Image: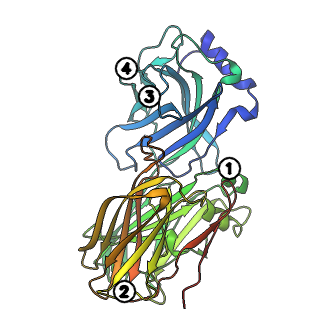
Amino acid sequence: MLAGKKLLALAFAGLLILPALASQKAFADGLFQENIQGNIAGRDVNLFVRVNPPILTTETAGDRFMQVRLFEGNNETIKYSTFIIEISKVTGSGEDTIMSSNAFHTESGLLTLKIQPQEGDVDVQATVDDFLQAYKADPGGTINIKGPILLDGGLYHFRIDVIGVDNVRALLPPDQIRTFDTYLSVGDVVTENVQYQGQNYPTTLISYYDKVEGFAFDPDSLTYSWSMPFNWDVERIKSATSIFVHEEIRSPKSFAGGGDVTAFDATVNGKPIVTRMLSVDPFSSQEDLTLHFLINRNDILSLAADVPDNADTMQFAFSPASDGGVKTSGEITTDTGGMLVLLDWEPNQLSAESQTTLGLEFHDAFSGERMDDDVTYDLRIIAPDGNEVYSQENQVAEGGSDSQTLTFPADETYTVELEVKGVTRDGQSPDLTRNGIARGTVIVPEFPVGAMLAVIGALGSLVVYQRLARKP
């Protein structure tokens, strides 16, 4: 780590005396990237932070990357940026264990920390700028680091202090230094042989939030269960504007009664969850059925109301649906947590070989607010045999709304797969931070479970999603 040289020491001193409002707080628990808004010297800026690969697990081989970009509202990167980046691992109690704290300078304004994960001390392989006493990135903005950063599964805290912009020979005055906080996740992988009726079924569980604890399977009820550390402090959750919990489990399709069904009863901390919080994917793998728990901030706040004060874990369980029923989806959530899509199926009674209109309305999954920007997406309707019966690519939902007209070829249970590919405002470069795939189900024939959802509330408040009554 760098020694406390004169200019860097002044920067740190400035940080210590900054008022609380100088820090731009954002908490992206459970995500791999975050775009944080702030203000520096009267300029509206954004700090983009990303961990790459996009979904990083402890089984991922090779180098890992942390990317930082400071840019203005017109999407122009701010050159000659100097950062102090502190990387910490968050423990189960919610406390931080600092792993690295260093100053970095990038002339291009783009900074990529190329991390070679290994045990031992942190080794930054770069020259130090004599004036700034900060590690200097190469012309492409890259600095190589060796050490235990992003090595283990769990939640990481990145504190980024912007201490200089525009000029390699200047640091910001203490009252203009800004701190950006984000919490990004490294997935944890557990592989177990589930035993049922004398057979072993290899099952994989990936927690994209924190480490898995107590994975178990009850053969009598066909119930899977596990937990992970979680801090249920309501004030912390309220301040976490983009918190997201994603758990993924893969079960062999050869497991009759387990991996070959498509409807499940699922709970979080013993409370049943709604269909948009559970995504079933039978097609990404030929061998396995994949199930996703997708729990956003508003869902977590709702769950927290019933959690005991001393609770320090989030507990998951699921089993084949007791009634065996599959329902048409009225809302689906992307697997990266950024987008909620409301589905409106018309006419009331869907039928094969008849024209159907699907209305699409895109909402920010964290705030619940409808998108005003244009959303680019792909849409696929997939039959039970895996064949696509409808496919459209690079469609644009102007102002967050669109519709598609299609015909179902037969009475079947179909999978709806929608991939968000970018959000665009006023001709600016696309915002890719909300990209992801959302999945749902449509039954033909069946009355849809809802026309549209009413999304009420405002950003920063608890949003309650209310499903409209089934049409008579």
**Marks 1 and 3, how far apart in space?**
27 Å
Sequence-wise first label, 4 or 1:
4
Image marks 2 and 1: residues in contact by CB distance under 8 Å: no
Residue shown at the point (47%, 22%) measured from the top left: 79
Q: Nearer the viewer, residue 388 or 205?
A: 388
Question: Which is in the foreground here, disc 2 or disc 1?
Answer: 2
Residue highlighted by disc 2: 444
The kind of residue tagged 3 is: Leu
| Label 4 CA crowd tier, 10 Å (few <14, some 14–19, many 20+) | some
Is 20 rendered above or below residue 216?
above
Whole-percent x, y for residue 80 in the image: 49, 19
Residue 194's place in the image compared with 37, above or below, is below
Query: Disc 4 marks which residue?
Result: 138
The scheme the figure's colours follow is: rainbow
Amino acid marked by disc 4? Asp
Residue 459 screen position, x and y as percent: 65, 54
Say the numbered circle drawn on residue 239: 1
User: Residue 83, located in which quarter of the rendered image?
Assistant: top right
Circle 1 sits in a helix, a strand or a loop, which is it? Answer: helix
Pointer 2: residues within 10 angstroms few (<14), some, or many (20+)? some
Residue at x 65% of width, y 27% of height? 42
Residue linked to disc 3 = 111
At label 1, which amino acid type do we have?
Answer: Ser
Q: Alpha carbon of mark 3 to alpha carbon of mark 4: how far?
A: 9 Å
* Contact flag, marks 4 and 2 (Cβ < 8 Å): no
Please report whichever mark, 3 or 2, sits nearer to the chain's N-terminal start. Answer: 3
> Which residue type carries mark 2?
Val
